Image (tube, helix red, strand yellow):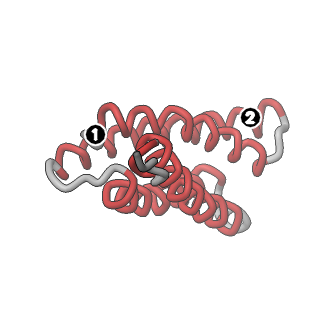
Amino acid sequence: MQKNWILTDKYPRLVQFGKYILIGGSTAALEFLLFMLLSYTLSITLTNIIAVTIATISNFLLNGKFAFCQSSRIWRSAILYMSLFFLNLLFSTLAIGLLVSSFGIPKALAKLSTMLCIVLWNFILYRKIVFV
């Protein structure tokens, strides 16, 4: 009896989550970098909208292709993804504004906090709803 040590066969959800984290990490880094660079010249609200939009487009394309292997029903996924995008954008924009203006939290920490919340609920929603 030969043991199968291939991770993808033994733990497909773990591999999928790893891909999701890798893609999410790279697009989060892109989002954060854009946010910090643009925040020196634009308002925090406009900065966040631009950074989230660019990162979200990259994230959709990469997750659909590599993490969740979306090959059909792309329009359905795109519509659901964009709906989630707008909810995440609304949440992050309002939360960052509140954390910075009302609680005096540094903008970088406020941004990272909202990004962490979004990462946690997005994997479940992608796997169960968006990319099925």
Residue 74 drawn at (x, y percent) = 19, 52
Residue at screen point 37% across, 59% down: 66
Residue at screen point 15% across, 52% down: 72
In this rendering, is residue 11 above or below 36?
A: above
Which residue in the protein does label 1 denote? 80
Left or right of 48, for residue 132: left
Classify residue 60 by image quadrant. bottom left
Can residue 46 be seen? no
Residue at screen point 36% across, 37% down: 127
Quadrant of the drawing holding the C terminus: top left
Quadrant of the drawing holding the N terminus: top left
Which residue in the protein does label 2 denote? 99
Label 2: which secondary element: helix
**How many angstroms separate mark 1 from mark 2 (CA)?**
28 Å
How crowded is the residue under tag 1: few (<14 C-alpha within 10 Å), some, or many (20+)? some
Residue 68, label in figure:
none
Residue 100 drawn at (x, y percent) = 76, 40
Labelled pair 1, 2 in contact (Cβ < 8 Å): no
User: Which one is in front, 16 or 61?
Assistant: 16
Residue at screen point 64% across, 60% down: 35
In this rendering, is residue 118 above or below 60?
A: above
Of callouts 1 and 2, which one flags the residue occurring earlier in the amino acid sequence? Answer: 1
Q: Amino acid at mark 2?
A: Leu
Can residue 117 be seen? yes
How crowded is the residue under tag 2: few (<14 C-alpha within 10 Å), some, or many (20+)? some
In this rendering, is residue 55 above or below 125?
A: below
Q: Amino acid at mark 1?
A: Leu
Residue 120 drawn at (x, y percent) = 56, 35
Left or right of 69, for residue 111: right
